[in-house]
Each structure stands twice: as C-alpha cells, then as structure tokens.
Amino acid sequence: MTATEHPFAHLSENQLAELAREFDAIHDQVRADLGERDRRYIKGVIRLHRQIAVAGRALLLGSRSKVAWTAGTGCLAIAKILENMEIGHNVLHGQWDWMNDPCIHSSTWDWDTASTAAAWKHSHNYIHHTYTNIRGKDKDLGYEIMRIDPHQKWHPAYLAQPLYNLLLMAFFEWGVAVHDMDVEAIRAGEKPMKDVWHDIKGISGKARDQILKDYVGWPLVSALAATAVGRLVHREPRSRARVLADRARGRRRKGAVRARLAAARAEGAGTFAATFWADFTANIIRNLWAHSIIFCGHFPDQTYTFSQDEVRDETRGGWYVRQLVGAANITGSPLFHLLSGNLGYQVEHHLFPDMPSSRYAEIASQVREICRRYGLPYNTGPLSKQLGTVHRTILRLAFPGGKVRPKPGPYRGDELERAA
Amino acid sequence: MAEVGMRPPASPLRRRALRALRWLFTPLRPDDYLELINPLWSTRELRGRVERVEPERGGAATVLIRPGFDWVGHRPGQYVRLGVVIDGVHHWRAYSLTSSPDRADGLISVTPKRVDGGVVSPFLVDRVHPGEVVRLGEVEGSFTLPDRLDRGLLFVTAGSGITPVMSMLRHLAPGPGLRDVVHVHSAREADGVTFGDELAALDEQHQGFRLELRITGEDGRFTPADLDTLCPDWRERETYACGPGELLDALQSHWKRHGDAGRLHHERFQPIVGGEDAEGSGGTVRFAHRNLDADCPPGTPILVAGENAGVDMPFGCRVGVCHTCVLPIREGRIRDLRTNAVSEKHNEIVRTCVHGAEGRVTVEL
Ligand code: FES
C-alpha cells in the first residue's frame, strides 16, 4: 500500500506556527464578540425544540388518525434531532458555557439519547477531538466494529460490516452509548471493572428512562386521552336526569355499559400501539439522520487519516491542520445546517470545538481563505456525494485490500464558489 | 458550574406532582416546559421580573422587582444575591434589600450605586428595562433589628451603607418604631445623598426620629468621637452601622474601648473570615472520595484547608456570596466563620469558603 502524500508536507515549521496564530486569532475574535445575539440564538433554538416536542406529543394524543400520527411523528423526530444535534452535542462541548447560565451548561446538561453526558464528554470531546483521525487512537474511526480505512488490517468479521452498518444506522444512539464504554479496552482488560460497572449503570439508567418515556409513558397518556375523549363524544343519548334516575333505582343497563367499556378499551389499546410506533419511528428517523451526518464528518473520500508516527511531536499548527484535513463539510441551506447541528461545518467545528455552532457559517470564509493561502485542502460537498462515498467505502473495505481514495488537493477558491 | 438562584421553597405537594411527572419529560423536567409559559414558575431557581426602575440621587437607582410567588420574604437589613444577564452572560452580585418587607404591592427593591468601570451596577442603574427576568438567590444576613425594641436605636451609615438601613426605616416608620431613633449619615455631597428626600421627610414627620446628616466635603469626616456631641447617649442605644470598612473598624474599636461592643451591630459587604482572634478549636476535614485528611486550624475555611492539602477545590468570590464553592458535608460540626455559629451537618450542602471545621468533618469530594 502506498503511503499517501502528507497534505501539509510542504509547510515549514514557521509556516505552521504562523497558521496556528491565524487560527487562534479567529477563535479569539469570535470569543470576544459573543454576546446577547448568541444567547438569543441558543435560547431560541431551545424554545423551538420544546415547542415542537409539545406539538408532537399533543398531536400523538390522537395518533389513531393517520394525519395526526404522521404530523406528530414528524414533529417528534424533528424535536429529537434538534435536541441531539444543535442543542445537546454543542452544549456538551461547552460551546455555551461562556454564558455562565446554569441551565445551559456542559456541566449540567443531559440529552435525550442513550449515552450519559459524562461518558460522551470523555469519549467524544476528549478522545475523538484530541486524537482525531489518528489510526489506533481515534476510536471513532469505524467505531471499533468497521473497517473504514484501508490501513486497518482486514479480518473476516468485516465481511458482515454492511450489515452492522445498517443496524447501526437504525439504532445509532445505542451504538454510540456502547461505544462510549470503550469495548476494545474492556476486551483487552485495560479498563477497571469498577469503571465498566459504573458505565453500565449509567447507560441502563438512561435506557430505562428513555424506554419508560417513549414506549410506556406517552403511549399510556395518549391511550388515556383517547378513552376519555371517546367517552365524552360517544355519550349515550340519555339525559343527565335520566341517568341519575336510572342509577338511583339501581337500573343500569349492564349490557350497554359492558359494551362501552369494551369499546373504550379497544380505543385505548389502539391508541397506545399507535403512539408506541410513532415514538419508535421518530427515534429511528433521528438515528438515521444523526448517523448520516456524523459519518459524513470524517469518512468521505476526501479526508486523511494519520499514523501514530506521523503525529509524534505535533505542534499546535500541526494539530490545526490535522483537524482541517481530517474532517469534511456538507453543503446545504441554513435549515439543513440547523438540523445537522451545524456539523455540515465539521471542519470549522474540529478547528474550534468550543465555539458556538452558530458562528461556524460566519467564519467559514476566513477558514477557506487560510486554506487557499497555505495550499491546504478544504473538504466539502453535497450530502448525496459525501454520504455516497462513505457507504461505498464501508462496502468496499468489507473485503480485503482497498486503496486510499484520491484526494482533491489544495483548495483553490473558485472551485468551491462554483460548487456552492 | 455556573451559579444558580435559590431553590424555591415550593410546596411539597407541588414538588411531588412535578416529580411524579418528571419521567415523561426526561432528561428535561416539567419545569422546562412550564417556563415557556412563564419563567417565574420554575421550581429550579427563584426568579423575579423587573417592574420599574427609579433613578435616585448620587448615581444610584432603585430597581423594583416582582419576585416569583415562592418568595419567602426578608427581614429588614438582609441582602439578596441577584443574578442578571448582561450581553448574554449571567452575573451575580449581592445587594441589600431596600424595600420594607411589608410593602402592600409585594415588590422588593435593591438600590445599587453606579460603580464606574463596574459591570453589574451600571447595567442596573442605566440599562435594565422593566420586564427583564432576574434570578434571585438566598436572602441572607444577620444585620437585622432586635425582636423587641425596648431601647433607643442609633444608625450610623455612610455612602451606600444606607441601603440596608433604608429597609429598616421603611419598616419602622408606619408603626411606633421611630419613637427614639438617631441616624447619623455621611455623604460626600449635599445633593448626592441617596434617599436624601425620604430621610428628610422622615425627620420632619416623626418626632422621635432625628437625622444628623454629615456632608464630608463641607463638615469634614465623621469620627466615632463625634458621637458624644451628635448623640450623647450612644452607649445606651442598640447601634446599627453600615459603610466602608475603615468606618466600621473605627466604630468597633470605639465601642470596645468606651462602650458595650455587644450593642454594636454592623454589616460588612466583604466579611472578614477567620483572622487572628478566631474562635473554636478547628479540626480536620476528610475528603471522602480522595481518601485524604486535611488539617483545618481555627478560623480557616474548609476551602483553604482543602487547597493547602492540594485538593482542587471549586471557588468563586471566596466571601460567601456566589455559592460556587458549595460542597456536600457528609457529617460533622462546622463553624460559620462570619457569625461563629456552630452547627451539626448531615448530608447538607455548605459554602466551604465561609465555614471552618469544628472537629472531624467529612466532605463528599
Ligand atoms: S460563596 Fe463564593 S466562593 Fe464561596
């Protein structure tokens, strides 16, 4: 296998140091400018999420109706996507800690997914964002179950990776939760049993809460609401006075009562099931979406991976460039960027993980300008292209061999403007 | 972690109802949705809404706040931690409450004076708008009137030291409270006396209230010795003093030497913690999770004891205002280094910067 040409081999130590200064300056300039506008943004997104969630749950109270089911499931899926991507992921990165708001703070936040906030902050914020794309150190390269880079040694187990991938897509949140536990370290006996136990307790606590809420609680609420409404609507055509009189004389039309009870039970059970499946569907949609966006972050053809030797004695400039070429963006509309938690700006996010996500779009042109001047690649493309190359790689590398895909080379400015 | 407002003393019933529903909203809480309707309904932290802002003389302003309905009230002379959002960032400061607790409209007020180069006071004086939501912390302070007023009162205040006393005067004025009160207040300029008009009106309306206004620019600085002429029977009175540190130090030594130090009550905005003549026996602090014992001599805050032993302790203001330093005490007796009150704690959260150990104390850290 031929080693890929290092994408920044042409930069001298001095140039790397200068580049680090330029990136630091972008960071500092944004940091100094953060204020009321940014607070309004994140508070707005949080409010939007909660309103959509309420709308979704309310619609699902009538989940026997097809229209309400579809609209409710859609709302719930979007709410969960917003909550995980633009809110949860970014708050847990500490992007909003500067507000000093105890309710929107990485130390207090928890999110609607199976990973505990603490385990995620370790495996993602620390391990992945520090050792990004370093083979053998960044556990997000293939999530320990897939061969995503031709440098990884092949093993027959990888033959089934297209299948794992499908399962992972559908149940991504659970995959991530288990991944956070660092299965490899457990297998190698490197992780103390005490910590493993702690993680298991954390995940099972969250799993219980999630299941209780989505698959017991809300279906039950919907069922109760539907039965109550059913009773109100399908009143017997007797006057109130008549009912009381009948009751006083102990004359209850037993058959009718029984029939009504049975109908109510059927109504309730039907609604329970409908809401159950709505919640299930919303979770799957959220998982598919999160999986797609996140896999496009580092696995499209354009990105580089690194051996541990290549990053020995890495300088700050080297770190920045590794983040830059190890990540890939997705082009899209502002709405797309909101729903993807601004991870369409994966490059900017990796350069500045603690910068409020809403600022990535604003600094993107400065980042591209630096790429152009230093002759560095700026990886980006539409979702269809990025996702296509990701899945092709997963299929191809299930089999032995495979070559590093050709890279786009240095960013030349106009290309991207044309593409956009 | 960032500072939080006070946990409102919501009724157990309301809390239980919210907790029972919580599993439907996990990982959020029902509160997070109720807040969408009215941010004052939160049971996470006590909040209030700015009702109006009235400019006062001397670069101050009175900010009138409608507290959430869980507000517990205050005793005149106490202060509250106030959290405001300025340019997107939460800031916290402690201010004396200047309102009487008996206000019919239920509003509370603070009266900050603009500190040039400051962050919070210029915001409160010049920029805050009615409708703004603020966060409210615990009401604290032992600078309060005696339960029974069988003795004359003497107030000695300077500058913005008037604020806690204003709450006392407003509370006393409607009843027979101002029967025998002398108030010595110093200010730099005559037309910059915060609450000047209200004080003059009290002086006029109440036979028993005498205001001695010292304008330091003209009359020179007030010294405790002046009391012999301004208020010859000062020894007999319960005295309440609030102002700059030097004034309080001077009063304290004057009372110690020539009067009864037990009758002088004072409020410092920067409490002296510990110091030479610290009381108590000290003790040791056990950091349960680190498996480490730290020596905690008399007068030493648990915070400092931990730091000296190499523990990475959380802290903020270090004077008992911000609550950044709070830690759960598993068990043990602690001494409040400001009031010297000793109390026994069992799984309670305390501010480590103003509490020392009294014997063996175990901390969850
Ligand atoms: S209360 Fe601020 S550090 Fe203790």
Image (cartoon, coloured by chain):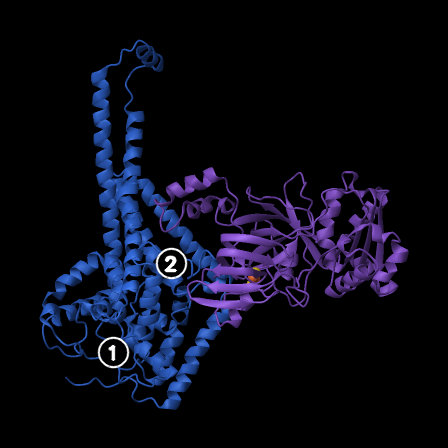
Chain colours: A blue, B purple
In this rendering, the answer to whether B325 lies above or below B35 is below
Q: Is residue B63 in sight in this rendering?
A: no
Q: Is residue B85 in sight in this rendering?
A: yes
For the residues beneath circles 2 and 1, the answer to whether they share a chain is: yes
- Read off the chain for label 1: A
* Disc 2 packing (10 Å; few <14; some 14–19; many ≥20): many
In this rendering, the answer to whether B298 lies above or below B213 is below
In this rendering, the answer to whether A101 lies above or below A278 is below
State the separation of the CA atoms marked 2 and 1: 28 Å
The image quarter containing residue A21 is: bottom left
Outermost residue, right side: B229
Q: Position of residue B103 (x, y in %)?
A: 67, 41
Q: What is the number of the mark on residue B109? A: none
- Read off the chain for label 2: A
Q: Considering the numbered disc 2 on the image, is that residue within a helix, a strand or a loop? A: helix
Viewer-closest of A411 and A112? A112
Q: Amino acid at mark 1?
A: Tyr
Q: Position of residue A197 (x, y in %)?
A: 28, 60
Q: Amino acid at mark 2?
A: Ile
Q: Is residue B256 left or right of residue B231?
A: left
The residue at the point 30 percent across, 11 percent down is: A246
Q: Which residue is mark 1?
A: A304
Outermost residue, top side: A249
Q: Position of residue B274 (x, y in %)?
A: 64, 65
Viewer-closest of B39 and A377? B39
Q: Which residue is mark 2?
A: A87
Quarter the C terminus of chain B occupies: bottom left
Q: Considering the numbered disc 1 on the image, is that residue within a helix, a strand or a loop? A: loop
Q: Position of residue A213 (x, y in %)?
A: 30, 46
The residue at the point 58 percent across, 51 percent down is: B138
N-terminal of the pair, mark 2 or mark 1, is: 2
Q: Is residue B214 left or right of residue B314?
A: right
